[in-house]
Image (cartoon, helix red, strand yellow):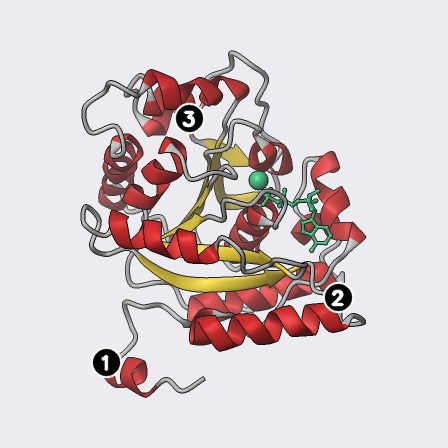
């Protein structure tokens, strides 16, 4: 893997789309693996009670095991729940179990309930930085809803990454997500939708091309040039507790996630000169 520039400071991505099955989890774990493969220090936080990201990263997540629930609901330190990911010396994950599904209700009466994850994450990131082990990227994998868990992610993060499935009604709901992001900005002014990724792209269909065109028209330069093709290798990797980056590194799916990771690394908002932003015409 070619080496990519390290971000100037930790980039925290919230992988969100209230629709299920659009590729959030697949995108979170594979981008994380692609970036970690280039030497970056990367943390994936599973925030979906289904625990699909935990599965893909080979982390146990049966009911009752220690997991991100203990951080969000009980206020325990995130550090105690960070696991190393096999085959990637610089990739780490925080698992989620089905216990997390109770969090929305249990937090209902708690003060600052949308800032629970932020508090824990900020402490962890500061500790790592102090120890000379700065985390370069965080990917928070959201559940398919706009409830309290996704709110926690949006308050903790800086960049929203929206995977868009190249299917009918692909852009439906994206406007709502933008509205929520705008609302959250009142408490987290840094938050921005920086990245949109087209997933399950099928070059043989007009529908995929149409979705891509519509997305680029309405979402502009946030849409990455690389789209992720529909690929069996991508979808079968989790059943082996792996990302496609190790399951089949030469497959088109793996290469497309590498390409997307490269684009993301080269688009660090912290190093973008004001003239770049003003003059961006793509
Ligand atoms: P979400 O997290 O948004 O619910 P997932 O990442 O779990 O979506 O993807 C939904 C399903 O589609 C999963 O079974 C996953 O393996 C499959 N999938 C995701 N991306 C691709 C792809 N590029 N090609 C084929 N299958 C994919
Ligand atoms: Mg998911």
Q: Residues within 10 Å of mark 3 (few under 14, many from 20)?
A: many
Residue at image position (61%, 50%) is 22
Left or right: 237 in relation to 111: right
Residue 202's tag is 2
- Residue 198 visible in rendering: yes
- Cα separation between marks 3 and 1: 38 Å
Looking at the picture, does residue 58 appear above or below residue 258? above
Question: Mark 3 vs ligand 2: CB under 8 Å?
Answer: no
Q: Position of residue 41 (x, y in %)?
A: 43, 50
Q: State the image coordinates of residue 235 (x, y, percent, origin top left).
A: 73, 46
> Regarding mark 1 in the picture, which secondary structure is present there?
helix
Q: How busy is the neighbourhood of tag 2: few (under 14 within 10 Å), some, or many (20 plus)? A: some
CB within 8 Å, label 3 to label 2: no
From this view, report whether residue 150 is shown above or below residue 272.
above
The label number, if any, that marks residue 68 in the structure image: 3
Q: What x and y, as percent, mark residue 212?
A: 61, 71
Closer to the observer: label 1 or label 2? Answer: 2
User: How far apart are labels 1 and 2 at the CA level?
Assistant: 36 Å
Relative to 19, is 226 above or below?
below
Looking at the image, which residue is at 20% across and 54% down? 189
The numbered mark at residue 128 is none
Q: Check the picture and name the quadrant holding the C terminus.
A: bottom left
Residue 27 percent location from the top left of the image: 57, 52
């Amino acid at each position: 893997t070619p080496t990519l520039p390290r971000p100037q400071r930790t980039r925290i991505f919230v992988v969100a789309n209230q629709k299920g099955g659009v590729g959030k989890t697949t995108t979170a774990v594979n981008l994380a693996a692609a970036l970690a493969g280039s030497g970056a220090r990367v943390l994936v936080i599973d925030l979906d009670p289904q625990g699909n990201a935990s599965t893909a990263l080979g982390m146990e997540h049966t009911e009752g095991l220690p997991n991100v629930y203990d951080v969000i609901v009980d206020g325990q330190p995130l550090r105690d729940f960070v696991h190393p990911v096999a085959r990637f010396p610089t990739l780490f994950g925080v698992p989620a179990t089905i216990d997390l599904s109770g969090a929305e209700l249990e937090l209902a009466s708690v003060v600052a309930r949308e800032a629970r994850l932020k508090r824990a994450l900020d402490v962890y990131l500061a500790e790592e930085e102090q120890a000379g082990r700065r985390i370069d990227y965080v990917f928070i994998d959201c559940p398919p809803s706009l409830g309290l868990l996704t709110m926690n992610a949006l308050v903790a993060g800086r960049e929203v990454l929206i995977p868009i499935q190249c299917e009918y009604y692909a852009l439906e709901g994206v406007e709502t997500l933008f509205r929520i992001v705008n609302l959250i900005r009142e408490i987290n002014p840094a938050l921005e939708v920086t990245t949109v990724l087209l997933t399950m792209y099928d070059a043989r269909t007009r529908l995929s091309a149409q979705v891509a065109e519509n997305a680029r028209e309405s979402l502009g330069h946030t849409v990455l040039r690389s789209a992720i093709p529909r690929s069996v290798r991508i979808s079968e990797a989790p059943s082996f507790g792996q990302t496609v980056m190790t399951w089949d590194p030469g497959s088109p799916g793996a290469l497309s996630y590498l390409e997307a990771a490269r684009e993301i690394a080269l688009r660090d908002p912290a190093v973008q000169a004001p003239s770049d932003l003003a003059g961006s015409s793509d």
